[in-house]
Amino acid sequence: MAAIPVETARVSPSGVPQARWPAGRLVPAVLLAPSLLFLAVFFALPALTLVLYSIMTQAADGTVGLPLTLAHYQHFFTIPVYSRVLLTTLRISLWTTVVAALLAYPVALVMVRSPPFLRQAITMIVIAPLIVSVVVRTYGWQLILGNGPTGILNWLLLSTGLAKKPVTLLYSETAVVIGSLHVFFPMMVLPVASALGRIDPRLEDAARTLGATAWRSFRRITLPLSLPGLAVGCTLVFSLTAGSFVTPAILGGTGAQMLGMLVDQQILVVYDWPFGATVASVLVAIVLAVNIVSMRILDRRRSVHVR
Amino acid sequence: MSTELRSPLAWLLLPVTGLVMVFILAPLVVTVAMSISDSPYVVFPPRGFTLGWYAKILQDPDFQASLWFSTMLALGATAGALLLGVPAAFAVARHEFLGRGAAAAALLSPLVFPALITGVALLQLFATIRSNNTPLNMLIAHVLVTAPYVVRTVTASLTLADTTLEDAARTLGAGRWRVFRRITAPQIAPGLAAGALFAFMVSFDNFPISLWLADAQHNPIPLLVFQLIGNVFSPAIAAMSTLMILFAMAVVIVLERVGGLRRAMAM
């Protein structure tokens, strides 16, 4: 046998074992280079160009170039048709986030604290739809929410006598909120469940032993400790809803136009690249702002806990 | 079971959870029920029973073309995502270097960015460089959105893998490649399989990227269904949707077998 390498793992401060692979610094660079190059060319570059397009001018022949202008932003924020789309998007995203949080919390609690069989069943039901195409799931909602007596919900309401005449839900903001709720629900349940799962059950047992009611121990222990998970869930659901296209296109139609549909319309129908890029940039700004604010809140909480 | 599920709060928690489960399953169940309805347009409750809609769509040339294209695209995207994602995951999980956190964030960044906007940005790029090869453009776009899923699952399984086993093998004289093949690979195989399967489904289901880049000859299934929803009112759409639901359910079961759904999602 050849010389035995007695290279024990040196563990760096962050806990990542070092010197596992040869030639130290070069290896991660080589492993990462293809991915990072790919991201630079096909993600960062086009995204930045798109933002740049939003302050450029489109010539009559369709080419986009100088002069630089903020006119498209002014256009977007001052013309009521467009600012209404922005408000609709924010309203639908906010409602979806709030309702998702209220419904996901109980589900996550039950998921984390049930016996294994029930936990697995709930996890499956929550996650499985994620793998079904959004188009298919939204089609299901179109069948359920259909206006007039042919809609399934209306059929149920009429045949049970809960309603005298059909309710009108399809092509409204409510329909889009319901559809978005269904599409993005797992994004709320999973982070909340994972935060709840990390809470030491002895903390609550201690509170109960010391005489706290179930409600009080929930309010003072479980809820505060699960807030980071809730924050992550809210950020995900809000950003994803704000950027959605399929659900508002099928369930909202002209009754609930959102930013994504406006981008689609401006670029694929009107061929107005700079204005489409402007709407896209506004959407990206909203998503980034929500993510940054939530990251700040989470960081501050963490540092408070350390102290 | 701990405190809350035994307390009076359970009376509130369990019914809410039950109703949410109904809410989640309702649109899927309804779609399946409609697909076997023996009537020329969608009416509820479904009338009679027929598998005729399935026969009809399976013979439909548009559906066949879309199915073929979606499958090829998803296979290509998965291969690309693995080629890019697995080495990157190794770098992030097994190496300490300056900017590791930034690299990890960059690798996952396409997941945070609105996919619809990634699609427009790519359309603009491909138009500028006059790249008219639709399948290639779509492949690049799909690799971009599937690779982060591979990075996430493989990083997770590399972090979970027992590195002391690798050290032991090295100490006992195994070469680096052999350690990888005999010790590391088997440990991360479930994560790798889950990542690949997930990448396949993400590409197969993708709408917001394909929307911008597809053309009439290269029309993936989700786009086809979307176009039909606006134009056709027959249970054929329900049959098409049901096939997609059944396919997704099969994948869910395999994912669960392979290494747990939640781990595949790395959440």
Image: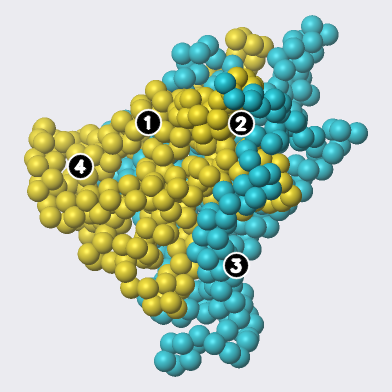
Chain colours: A cyan, B yellow
- Quadrant where the N terminus of chain B is found in the figure: top right
The residue carrying mark 2 is B159
Residue bearing mark 4: B239
Nearer to us of marks 3 and 1 is: 1
Residue under label 1: B252
The type of residue carrying mark 1 is: Val
Q: Give the residue at the far top of this rendering.
A: A209
Spatial distance from mark 3 to mark 2, Cα to Cα?
37 Å
Residue A29 placement (x, y as % from top left): 62, 52
Q: Write down the residue under mark 3.
A: A282
Examine the rendering and report whether any part of residue A26 can be seen.
yes
**In this rendering, the label closer to the viewer, 2 or 4:** 2
Label 3 crowd (10 A; few <14 / some 14-19 / many >=20): some
Q: Amino acid at mark 2?
A: Thr
Query: Are discs 3 and 4 located on one and the same chain?
Result: no
Q: Secondary structure at mark 4?
A: helix
Establish if A9 lies above or below A101. above
Asked whether, in this view, residue B173 is left or right of residue B50, the answer is right
Please tell me which residue is depicted at 84% across the width and 33% down the height of the picture: A305
Residue at point 34%, 33% (across, down): B251
Query: Is there CB contact under 8 Å for labels 3 and 1?
Result: no
